[in-house]
Amino acid sequence: MTDVERLQRMVSDLRSMRNSCEPKNNGNPRYLHYSGAVSNLLWLIGDLQAEED
């Protein structure tokens, strides 16, 4: 499994955990932190993919 694949799996897992948070909005600190973590992982994925090209 490549680093990109591992990160994509983490994104999927974090999104699933985020979707179990109530309320589902940025007023919920946990939901906001999950969203931030997903955004950061997506940035890393893009960076790694750019290096591969």
Image (cartoon, helix red, strand yellow):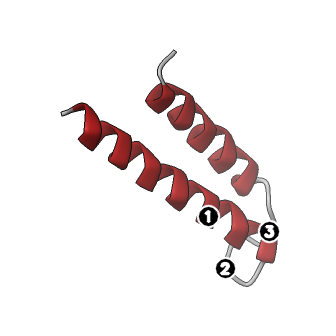
CB of mark 1 within 8 Å of CB of mark 2?
yes
Which residue is label 1 attached to? 35
User: What kind of element bears circle 2?
Assistant: loop
User: What kind of element bears circle 3?
Assistant: helix
Q: Disc number at residue 30?
A: 3
Amino acid type, mark 1: Ser
Query: Residue 44, position in %: x, y?
Result: 45, 49
Query: Residue 53, position in %: x, y?
Result: 18, 33
Name the residue: 42% across, 43% down: 45
> Does residue 48 sit above or below 40 in this rendering?
above
Marks 2 and 3 sit apart, C-alpha to C-alpha, by: 9 Å
Foreground residue among 26 and 1: 1
Query: Residue 41, position in %: x, y?
Result: 53, 50
> Does residue 43 sit above or below 6 in this rendering?
below
Q: Is residue 12 left or right of residue 24?
A: left
Marks 3 and 1 sit apart, C-alpha to C-alpha, by: 9 Å
